Image (tube, helix red, strand yellow):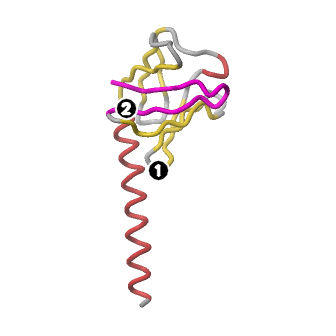
Amino acid sequence: MNRLIISAVAGGLAVLASSAAFADTAATGQWKYTVGSNTDCSITINEDQTVVTTGTCPTGNYAVAHWETSGSNIKLLSASDELVAILKPKGEGFEGKRVYDSRKVALSR
Protein backbone atom coordinates (compact mmCIF):
# COMPACT_ATOMS: atom_id res chain seq x y z
CA MET A 1 0.00 0.00 0.00
CA ASN A 2 2.80 2.43 0.90
CA ARG A 3 4.56 1.69 -2.40
CA LEU A 4 1.37 2.49 -4.30
CA ILE A 5 1.01 5.85 -2.53
CA ILE A 6 4.69 6.69 -3.08
CA SER A 7 4.41 5.77 -6.78
CA ALA A 8 1.32 7.95 -7.19
CA VAL A 9 3.00 10.93 -5.51
CA ALA A 10 6.18 10.49 -7.58
CA GLY A 11 4.12 10.27 -10.77
CA GLY A 12 2.25 13.46 -9.90
CA LEU A 13 5.49 15.31 -9.22
CA ALA A 14 6.90 14.13 -12.56
CA VAL A 15 3.85 15.52 -14.38
CA LEU A 16 4.19 18.87 -12.61
CA ALA A 17 7.89 19.06 -13.43
CA SER A 18 7.29 18.23 -17.09
CA SER A 19 4.58 20.89 -17.49
CA ALA A 20 6.87 23.52 -15.93
CA ALA A 21 9.65 22.44 -18.28
CA PHE A 22 7.20 22.70 -21.22
CA ALA A 23 6.38 26.30 -20.33
CA ASP A 24 10.08 27.16 -19.90
CA THR A 25 11.01 25.68 -23.29
CA ALA A 26 7.92 26.92 -25.11
CA ALA A 27 8.25 30.46 -23.74
CA THR A 28 11.80 31.35 -24.72
CA GLY A 29 12.49 33.21 -27.93
CA GLN A 30 11.01 36.18 -29.78
CA TRP A 31 7.32 37.00 -29.54
CA LYS A 32 4.86 39.59 -30.78
CA TYR A 33 3.48 41.06 -27.53
CA THR A 34 -0.04 42.41 -27.92
CA VAL A 35 -1.77 44.47 -25.23
CA GLY A 36 -5.30 45.44 -26.21
CA SER A 37 -5.04 46.75 -29.78
CA ASN A 38 -1.31 47.63 -29.55
CA THR A 39 0.58 45.23 -31.82
CA ASP A 40 3.79 47.26 -32.25
CA CYS A 41 5.76 45.52 -29.50
CA SER A 42 8.11 42.57 -29.72
CA ILE A 43 9.68 40.86 -26.74
CA THR A 44 12.44 38.33 -26.44
CA ILE A 45 12.03 35.96 -23.53
CA ASN A 46 15.43 34.67 -22.43
CA GLU A 47 16.31 31.47 -20.58
CA ASP A 48 17.78 33.53 -17.70
CA GLN A 49 14.22 34.86 -17.08
CA THR A 50 14.93 38.33 -18.47
CA VAL A 51 12.83 40.00 -21.16
CA VAL A 52 14.08 42.41 -23.83
CA THR A 53 11.50 44.64 -25.52
CA THR A 54 11.59 46.40 -28.91
CA GLY A 55 9.05 48.64 -30.59
CA THR A 56 6.25 50.55 -28.90
CA CYS A 57 5.87 48.50 -25.74
CA PRO A 58 4.06 49.40 -22.51
CA THR A 59 6.18 51.42 -20.07
CA GLY A 60 6.18 52.21 -16.36
CA ASN A 61 4.24 49.76 -14.17
CA TYR A 62 3.13 47.92 -17.33
CA ALA A 63 6.66 47.28 -18.64
CA VAL A 64 7.73 43.64 -18.68
CA ALA A 65 11.29 42.94 -17.50
CA HIS A 66 11.22 39.36 -16.15
CA TRP A 67 9.19 36.18 -16.49
CA GLU A 68 8.65 32.92 -14.65
CA THR A 69 6.48 29.87 -15.01
CA SER A 70 3.67 28.63 -12.84
CA GLY A 71 2.73 25.18 -14.08
CA SER A 72 2.04 25.63 -17.80
CA ASN A 73 1.32 29.35 -17.33
CA ILE A 74 3.71 32.25 -17.81
CA LYS A 75 3.89 35.14 -15.34
CA LEU A 76 5.16 38.42 -16.79
CA LEU A 77 6.80 40.62 -14.16
CA SER A 78 7.95 44.25 -13.97
CA ALA A 79 11.50 45.36 -13.15
CA SER A 80 10.42 45.52 -9.48
CA ASP A 81 9.01 41.96 -9.75
CA GLU A 82 5.38 43.10 -9.63
CA LEU A 83 2.97 40.85 -11.52
CA VAL A 84 2.04 42.39 -14.88
CA ALA A 85 0.08 39.48 -16.40
CA ILE A 86 -0.54 35.75 -16.19
CA LEU A 87 -0.74 34.00 -19.55
CA LYS A 88 -2.13 30.55 -20.32
CA PRO A 89 -1.23 28.40 -23.32
CA LYS A 90 -3.52 29.13 -26.28
CA GLY A 91 -2.78 27.40 -29.57
CA GLU A 92 0.80 28.23 -30.58
CA GLY A 93 1.03 31.13 -28.13
CA PHE A 94 -0.17 32.39 -24.77
CA GLU A 95 -3.07 34.64 -23.72
CA GLY A 96 -4.25 36.29 -20.54
CA LYS A 97 -5.12 39.60 -18.93
CA ARG A 98 -3.02 42.37 -17.51
CA VAL A 99 -3.40 42.64 -13.73
CA TYR A 100 -3.69 46.44 -13.51
CA ASP A 101 -6.55 47.00 -15.97
CA SER A 102 -7.67 43.55 -17.23
CA ARG A 103 -6.65 44.38 -20.83
CA LYS A 104 -6.15 41.33 -23.02
CA VAL A 105 -2.49 40.33 -23.39
CA ALA A 106 -1.17 37.83 -25.93
CA LEU A 107 2.12 36.35 -27.06
CA SER A 108 2.22 35.06 -30.64
CA ARG A 109 5.01 34.01 -33.02
Q: Say few, some or many: other residues with alpha carbon within 10 Å of mark 1 (under 14 / 14 to 19 / 20 or more).
A: some
Residue 108 falls in image quadrant:
top left
Which three-letter amino acid code belongs to the residue tagged 1? Gly
Residue annotated with mark 1: 71
Residue at 43 percent of width and 29 percent of height: 45
| Quarter in which the C terminus is drawn | top left
Task: Tell me the residue at 40%/75% (across/down).
Answer: 8
- How far from the left and from the top, in percent, is residue 1? 42, 90
Magenta span includes 83: no
At 57% from the left and 32% from the top, the residue drawn is: 85
Residue 107 counted in the magenta span: yes
* SS for dot 1: loop
Mark before the other along the chain sequence, 1 or 2: 1
Residue at 37% across, 69% down: 11
Q: Nearer the viewer, residue 108 or 68?
A: 108
Secondary element at tag 2? strand
- Position of 83 with respect to 14 (left or right) is right
In the image, is 31 to the left or to the right of 105?
left
- Badge 2 is on which residue? 93
| Magenta part of the chain | 92-109
Between disc 1 and disc 2, the foreground one is 2
Q: Is residue 70 above or below residue 99?
A: below
